[in-house]
Amino acid sequence: MRNLRIVGSVIAAVLIAGAVAAFAITWRPAIAAIDPPAPQSFDTALVKRGRDLAAIGNCNDCHTVRGGQNFAGGLPVPTPFGTIFSSNITPDAETGIGRWSEAAFRRAMRSGVNRDGQHLYPTFPYDHFTNVTDADDQALYAYLMTRQPVHAPARENQLSFPLDQRFVIAGWKLLFLRHGTYQPDSRQSAEWNRGAYLVEGLAHCGSCHTPRNALGAERASAQFAGGDVDNWHAYAINAQSPAPVPWDADALFAYLRDGWHPDHGVARGPMAQVVSNLSSVPPSDIRAIATYMADVFGAPTPDRKRQGEAVLAQVKSPAPQPSKTNAAGASIYAAACATCHETDRSLPYGGVNLALSTAIANSDPRNLANIVLSGVRAVEGEPSPIMPGFASSMDDGQITALLNYLRARFSNQPAWTGVEKTVETARRTQTVFLQTSPGPRNAPANATQRDKP
Amino acid sequence: MMTLKVNGHDHEIDADPDTPLLYVLRDDIKLNAAKFGCGLGQCGSCTVIVDGKAVLSCVTPLLLLEGKQVTTLEGLGTIEAPAPIQRAFMEEQAAQCGYCIAGMMMRAQALLQSNPKPTDEQIRAELEPHLCRCGTHMRILRAVHRAIRLMDTADASSTTHRSAQ
């Protein structure tokens, strides 16, 4: 009897301790609401710095929905767990972050907790933003609090139980959120460290370009090995890069700043928005990102370098390659693609020679299917690259024939399998992406290119 | 040799399978409503309807049209009996030089066939691939809205039905 009582009290003690621990892990206090600060109360230089940082962070891409107001949220983000809608980060007192103090903003950036003390889903990439310094958080806060307030209530996330319970996120954080601001590497240059700070932090490149595990966290062991986002494949941007010509720091700088590079083509899909934002930030920061990422890519092997040079030589003096095995694909290419992709009109207004296309060299045909179906939209009010979509004129079988032809002719990689299924899925999902994504606002070309389309 | 169905008629066409539909329409069948603008699928002036969808005929090779129904502006109505979309464009005087208008009308027609009551925003988004260098955009938008009203009336149904087949 006494033994039973002891066992009983031990169980009770364990349960209570467990409950206390669970409470400590999951519970976060609310941070007191403030009266929305007057825009004039922020230093203009600070606001300007925040503007550049917000562009590097690509904040407007997720926090704006097509046809909606800037930063007012509402963009559906499809995840393997359900659809999560981005929040309103304008300084609206009721539906935005107008009543958030700077401390509340910093806590959200660093630990993914909102002002009320609720855990935020890691679609908001605080696993990266935890690296952002106090000074940069202050500037971002100043920038966001001086935007136009927009009344836009949050949309209900579409998640099933138990993921719709926010305390579950506390467990996720316990497993995957590593706190601690970025630690510089003293063996590297200041520029490299600046780039690393931006890439690993605010720019959160890994959110798309690093594959995720079954619980939706980035796999640390496969950093930058290529990931999935919005039914696009974000290419590997490390030594496994499928780009026909290896990337280097200069090419990365030009691509990130101008949105295109003659050896790689024009940024499109979700990356179009990224380069559109980067076109307006200080070149020194883009240079830093390029320097760090070139190191992540690593110097190409002699073999890889030779292949890249061979591709560039082939592009300069192309040999006609009539296809006997895929007549349909060849004819479609000749009539629908070659008129732009095989001309002497240079990038970004001419089409890239497809031997340089990463989409065709990549192991996953999804991006190529997306681009053939939807094309490249022109940027409103700016001379910009444009490609018509072929969703209305080609059926899945015809696009499949085209994709197989392009892979055989323009890459030295083995044929894809299951292309028709990929095309079918792409047709379904791209329609959604194009209806919700805000799309780029700046033309991806630098000012000197803009006046000669 | 292939059979191309245009505006309800069969045409025997002797051309390479990679010949753009636009060339066949203009040179072989002598239907000149669809215009050659850029030849790159970037301006919209060559737009026709294929199986109910607006398609850029300058970048659509013949081989994609096996067994499909092509409708050009000539297939919508005649000078004596213009289709609602044509009447609407005339009544709003929506053409200035007119080069883009055939394409504009065809995409607007395709839109109204699939969505008889589009919003202004939907019309603008749909016509986005079309360039008009004269600046007649506001009249074009008014014309599409007028066509919506015209198509609402019974006399409009015959032409829309025909092109939808």
Image (cartoon, coloured by chain):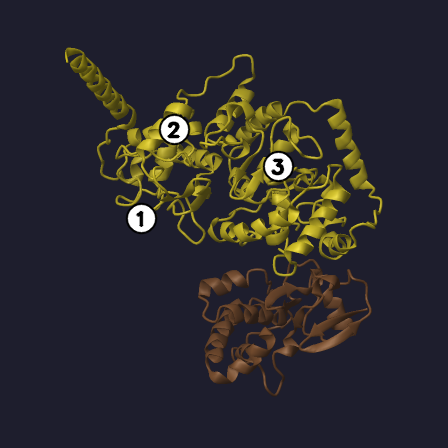
Quarter residue A251 falls in: top right
Q: Which chain is yellow?
A: A
- Same chain? Circles 2 and 3: yes
Say which mark, if any, is on residue A153. Answer: 1
Q: Looking at the picture, how far across and down is residue A162, in whole percent?
A: 34, 37
Q: Please state the chain letter of the residue tagged with numbered disc 3 in the rendered image.
A: A
Which residue, given by chain and number where applicable, does mark 3 sit on? A255
Viewer-side label of 1, 3: 1
Q: CA distance from mark 2 to mark 3?
A: 35 Å
Q: Secondary structure at mark 3?
A: helix
Which residue, given by chain and number where applicable, does mark 2 sit on? A172
Asked if one can make out residue B86 in the rendered structure from this viewpoint, the answer is no
- Name the one closer to the observer, B163 or A72: B163
The answer to whether marks 2 and 3 mark residues whose Cβ atoms lie closer than 8 Å is no
**Type of amino acid at the residue the image marks with label 1:** Pro
Q: CA distance from mark 1 to mark 2?
A: 26 Å
Q: Looking at the picture, how far across and down is residue A73, in whole percent?
A: 38, 45
Q: CA distance from mark 1 to mark 3?
A: 37 Å
Q: Secondary structure at mark 2?
A: helix
Q: Secondary structure at mark 1?
A: loop
- Name the one closer to the observer, B76 or A293: B76
**Type of amino acid at the residue the image marks with label 2:** Trp
Q: Looking at the picture, how far across and down is residue A362, in whole percent?
A: 66, 38
Give the residue at x 40% y 24%: A175
Q: Residues within 10 Å of mark 3 (few under 14, many from 20)?
A: many
